[in-house]
Amino acid sequence: METLEGLRHKIEGAKDIKSVVRTMKAVAASNIGQYELALNSLGEYYYTVALGVVAYFKNEKPKGIKEKKAVKLKGEKGICAIVFGSDQGLVGSFNETLVDFVSERLKTSKGTHEVWPVGERVQLLLEDAGFNITRKFLVPGSVHAIRPLVGEILVKSQLSITQEPVKEFYIFHNQPKPGSGYQAVSQRLLPLDEKWRHGFDDVSWPTRLLPQVAGNTDKTLSALIREYLFVSLFKSCAESLASENASRLAAMQRAEKNIEEMLGDLSHSYNLTRQSAIDEELFDVVSGFEALKKGK
């Protein structure tokens, strides 16, 4: 049986851990709020960019975007996967489910694969899964830190395309579910071809007035493409961070519940041990009194 001192030490330790868990739970809840606010604003901005693309294609068809016929390539097509994971732990199976999703999707795609992980923990899992890691990025710690990360990824992707023109880029990340939880999703980022153009078929112009493009059409398209790529990566990163903090919040809630149950068990054991010690002391006092009484 454990001593009272040992049980008291365990109870104090559990209370300290509970305090840390509550702090982490509060931080995760606060982070979720800022990322959800950014996503709400980003949704309206993405819709505006999509309307701009729709307006452009109603007037112009750029020479570079056309249906490509099958051609014989000298080598295999290059496929790059940008995977948004986490740098920190205590997120449950956040990274594991994402890596399984990436593995399942890339198995069905023919070509040479390379992966750009965002996050050290997801990077280690991807390496264990046998993927070729060519670039690494750190997870931004706030909404304001997403923009520099997105800019860096865009610069590196442009450099990669110049070195290997026949290349496709995909984004993999966890996306929050309505209500609670998250799910792994993917998006084709590059190239911007006819398939990309048809992705805007569901976006309709909101008024009866037909849109017109004013000014230089090439500059207009370049600006729209630049904003589309930026908002796609920004949205993926923000959704990943919101999902990560939601997963951490759920993990902290489970940990807090387990700690409360453990504290209840420890308190019960402490009370029983303390009562047993009191009973023994009383028994010794009574026994001593009876012995003295008989001696007299």
Image: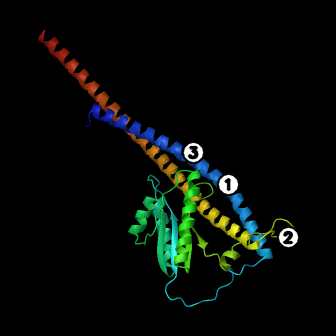
Q: Position of residue 164 (x, y in %)?
A: 52, 79
Residue under the image location 43 percent in, 45 percent down: 258
Which mark identifies residue 210? Answer: 2
- Circle 1 crowding by C-alpha within 10 Å: few under 14, some 14–19, many from 20: few
- Circle 2 crowding by C-alpha within 10 Å: few under 14, some 14–19, many from 20: few
Q: Amino acid at mark 3?
A: Ser
Based on the displayed image, in which of its 4 quarters is residue 8 positioned? top left
Q: Are marks 2 and 1 in contact (CB under 8 Å)?
A: no
Which mark identifies residue 40? Answer: 1
Q: Position of residue 166 (x, y in %)?
A: 55, 81
Rendered position, 165 above or below 290: below
Inter-mark Cα distance, 3 to 1? 16 Å
Residue found at the very far bottom of the displayed protein: 72
Q: Amino acid at mark 2?
A: Leu
The residue labelled by disc 3 is 30
Number of marks in picture: 3
Q: Are marks 2 and 3 in contact (CB under 8 Å)?
A: no
Q: Amino acid at mark 1?
A: Asn
- Circle 3 crowding by C-alpha within 10 Å: few under 14, some 14–19, many from 20: few
